[in-house]
Amino acid sequence: MSAAQKSLALHLGLIGGLFALAFILPTYHHGNFARIMVLATYAIGYNVLFGYTGLLSLGHAMFFAAGMYGMGLAMQYGGVPALPALFLGIIAATILAAVVAVLALRTIGVAFMIVTLMFAQTGFLTILYFGEWTRGDEGFVLQQKVRQIAGLDLSDPMTRYLAAWVLFSVALLATARMMHVAFGGVLVAIRENEERTRMLGYNVFAHKFAAVVISGAIAGAAGAAYGLLFGYVGATFASVQYSIFPLLWVLLGGAGTTIGPFIGALFMFYLIDYSSGLTSAYMLIAGVALVLLTLFARAGIAGEIKRRWAPWLP
Amino acid sequence: MGAVASLSLLQTHGLTRRYGGLTAVDNVDFALPEGQVHALIGPNGAGKSTFVGMVSGRIEASEGRVEFEGRDVTGLPTHKRIRAGMAYTFQITSIYARLSLFDNVALAMGNRNRDAATEALARVGLDDRADQIAGDLSYGHQRLLEIAMGVAQAPRLLILDEPTQGLAESEIEGFNAIINALRGQTTILLIEHNMNVVMALADAITVLDQGAVLATGAPEAIRADAAVQAAYLGSG
Ligand SMILES: Nc1ncnc2c1ncn2[C@@H]1O[C@H](COP(=O)(O)OP(=O)(O)OP(=O)(O)O)[C@@H](O)[C@H]1O
Ligand SMILES: [Mg+2]
């Protein structure tokens, strides 16, 4: 099998496996997996910018939240049906990403991290400031009766799982495709050697801009879907914590690999899940796991597999 | 010289770059006829890299203009100048160290044609290593890879900043052969410290000293020039 065939088989295998799990998993894990697939989609978006383009953002929660609030506010106050509201959320995140890209891409390295962090913080405070509509920290619940697409009740566990599965599959296949074509190669080239890439005649700014926008749009899609599928919209999702999560998932799973974001989100979710059952200091356990990983598998789980055994891993 | 002056592919007018109080390149007028192999020489710190940096757009000019193919490109960003037909290899090797040789050349060509990449690598004798990681190559081979990338871009103007630095004697011979093979098709601006290479390859030489053009002309004339000898050749 060629590398392209192997990677296609891997992606379809993962997607097929997750589909099968919809009918196998016990209730508790079934619910977890629905959540993980949406969070993994968020991580896939983050990975486009961090893993492939080499730009470390500390503010992706603003895109996740823009999607969530774009969707949620439209439904709550505009009476917009679920599906168009989902797209409004994605559009909101995309526009925000374009604006942030133009401003933040004037900076590089640590300054880029700080600028994205500040933007996200501004977004968070804006949500709190307009508490009258956003309900601030408390957030608001989307009623079950409006959470429907084409007559399908998204609060039903199986429907919800499959909706999350569709979202994840689209994001995974779209990014895998993106990395297969020339555009993705240029993103990697920018990550590896920006100066050389510019001196080969590539418009580095335009590519970085596109990467921020695509990354923000996917994060926004995940945020909108999360609100819609789990029926809750709240300011927590715009907090620093939610900017750090995708970074951790991607680092853990393997930055710059297509399946890394999913592996990282899955691993971290269950790590916290199990350790919080053992001790209240569960974040400590998560922290220790991360330290071990950075010591023994610096490229993350999928990254390490790629390095040692499967260099074809996309 | 013929009655009709050959067309200049590249011209600079009053090109100047200042760093604070230091004028690294000082009011340089330069013309490079199409098809020529032109060597740019001069002592360390003469402003050679800064000059070609301004030609390619990598370094912003403080003053002056750059014309490429008769068009003023001074205001164009780097990537547009490169797209217009320039290629540039760095004095300090700049390749994609974590990518394969094939990926390096593919990025230079702008496509992933396996045969074309193999051909580009074959020019520097690295075609049997297409799937190796570039960073694993020896220093000399990395420099050859960068040259192969520059050639693979199929530029009209190839700018090489001290390409033979760190190459073994046999590799330098290989380099000379590459330039001779390109002669006539590609205009080449070559910064070079190795006078044997300069004398073997250059159709014309420009000597830069303290940012300014000290002399320009045919190799033999430059070699005989007393001022050049004082500034450079004697001490070099
Ligand atoms: N970014 C910079 N900031 C300040 N001074 C600089 C900068 N770049 C170059 N210079 C100075 O400008 C002068 C010309 O430098 P340049 O690198 O162009 O010389 P060069 O002829 O290429 O020398 P070499 O043969 O050593 O490569 C030197 O005095 C150098 O110290
Ligand atoms: Mg130099």
Image: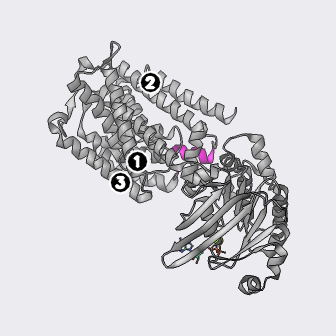
Mark 2 belongs to chain: A
Q: Is residue A142 above or below residue A138?
A: above
Q: Is residue A249 magenta?
A: no
Disc 2 residue: CB within 8 Å of ligand 1: no
Viewer-proximal residue among B158 and A269: B158
Where residue A172 sits: x, y (%)?
A: 50, 32
As drawn, the residue found furthest toward the front would be B3
Q: Secondary structure at mark 3?
A: helix
Where residue A294 sits: x, y (%)?
A: 47, 54
Mark 3 belongs to chain: A
Q: Quadrant of the N terminus of chain B?
A: bottom right
Range covered by the magenta-colored residues: A299-309
Residue displayed at 21% across by 26% down: A76
Residue displayed at 81% across by 55% down: B182
Question: In the picture, residue A312 is in which quadrant?
Answer: top right
**Circle 1 Cα neighbour tier, 10 Å, few/some/many (<14 / 14–19 / ≥20):** some
Residue displayed at 25% across by 24% down: A75
Disc 2, disc 1: CB below 8 Å? no
Q: Which mark is residue A102?
A: 1
Residue highlighted by disc 2 = A166
Viewer-proximal residue among A225 and B109: B109
Q: Is residue B218 above or below residue A87?
A: below
Q: Secondary structure at mark 2?
A: helix
Q: Earlier in the sequence, mark 1 or mark 3?
A: 1
